[in-house]
Image (cartoon, rainbow, N blue to C red):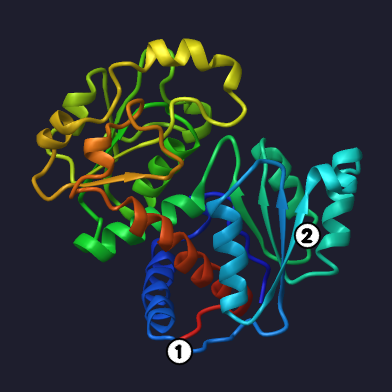
Amino acid sequence: MAIKHFLQFRDFTRDEFDHLFARTRWIKNQFKSYQKYWPLNDRTLVMIFEKASTRTRLSFEAGVQQLGGAAIYLNTRDSQLGRGEPVEDAAQVISRMSDIVMIRTFEQAIIERFAANSRVPVINGLTNEYHPCQILADIYTYIEQRGDIQGKTVAWVGDANNMCNTWLQAAEVLDFKVHVSTPPGYGINQELVGKIDPAHCQVFADPMAACRGADLVTTDVWTSMGYEAENEARMKAFADWCVDAEMMAAANPQALFMHCLPAHRGEEVTAEVIDGPQSVVWDEAENRLHVQKALMEFLLLGRVQG
């Protein structure tokens, strides 16, 4: 089977995502009913971290072990990558000693270079530009709670960051719409997302207008990793982009609230919303574990039926 990577959401087709969501449901049911399922017995996942993580490390490490495999954690500070070894050389070596690699780093170019020199599948655990595994979990959570996301509306409130970029890719692949509202100066980077299709994206100056009629309202921290120097300026710029009860009231009555976490209550979202009845952030966080198990199974074994 040809090597397949998951570096951006658009790397997979709708049919492949439908398969992943079906496998996620089956694998999660096995986990919840304490049924042993070890399709990755004797397989090794290498996890390379340049950015700090809680959910990414835990979900991948626990996930591969629950599938019968093993995980090896590498931090760039503690490896030759942190001392200037070329990414291309590291990819050649690491991919000869493992079966699959997950990388959480800064520039997307780093993971693209690694994948181009890898003999095994590579997964994007997060870059400055994209966060496909998180959006995979978010969409599965929506499907689990409300059904098919096709034709629905997602309101993105806040910074047009890696999460927003990936939501826009997902909207194109899975045929739904994203309402984007950002403060001036923090809008969509069209070099990363390409031409905006009005069938799948609409931009709003007013976050309340973006939330109106939405089926899902979602946000992220105002200052992502790597942008800490901008924190003071961002606090001022984003003051009106806090998801609150009024915004949720403008959305569809059955709308869900999501946040990829960690969250800062009172900044990008009020405690009333994130701890309220429409919030599914804990299901969303848990589903990172299950969708990534389905992802690793697919990348290593192809279309398993079960």
Task: Left or right? Give the position of 11 relative to 253.
Answer: right
- In the rendered image, the vertical position of residue 44 relative to residue 106, given as above or below: below
Identify the residue under disc 1: 35
* Corner quadrant of residue 110: top right
- In the rendered image, the vertical position of residue 53 relative to residue 183, given as above or below: below
* Corner quadrant of residue 218: top left
- In the rendered image, the vertical position of residue 190 relative to residue 271, given as above or below: above
Question: Of helix, strand and loop, which one carries label 2?
Answer: loop
Give residue 96's position: percent from left, percent from top.
85, 68
Quarter of the image with the N terminus in it? bottom right
Q: Which residue is at 59% across, 51% downward?
A: 125
The mark found on residue 287 in the picture is none
Q: Which residue is at 27% across, 36% downward?
A: 271
- In the foreground, 146 or 77: 77
Q: Residues within 10 Å of mark 2 (few under 14, many from 20)?
A: many
Of labels 2 and 1, earlier in sequence is: 1
Mark 2 and mark 1: span between their CA atoms? 33 Å
- In the foreground, 83 or 286: 286
Q: Residues within 10 Å of mark 1 (few under 14, many from 20)?
A: few
Task: Left or right? Give the position of 166 relative to 25.
Answer: right
Task: Left or right? Give the position of 118 relative to 210.
Answer: right
Q: Which residue is at 86% across, 59% downward?
A: 92
Q: Amino acid at mark 1?
A: Gln
Q: Amino acid at mark 2?
A: Ser
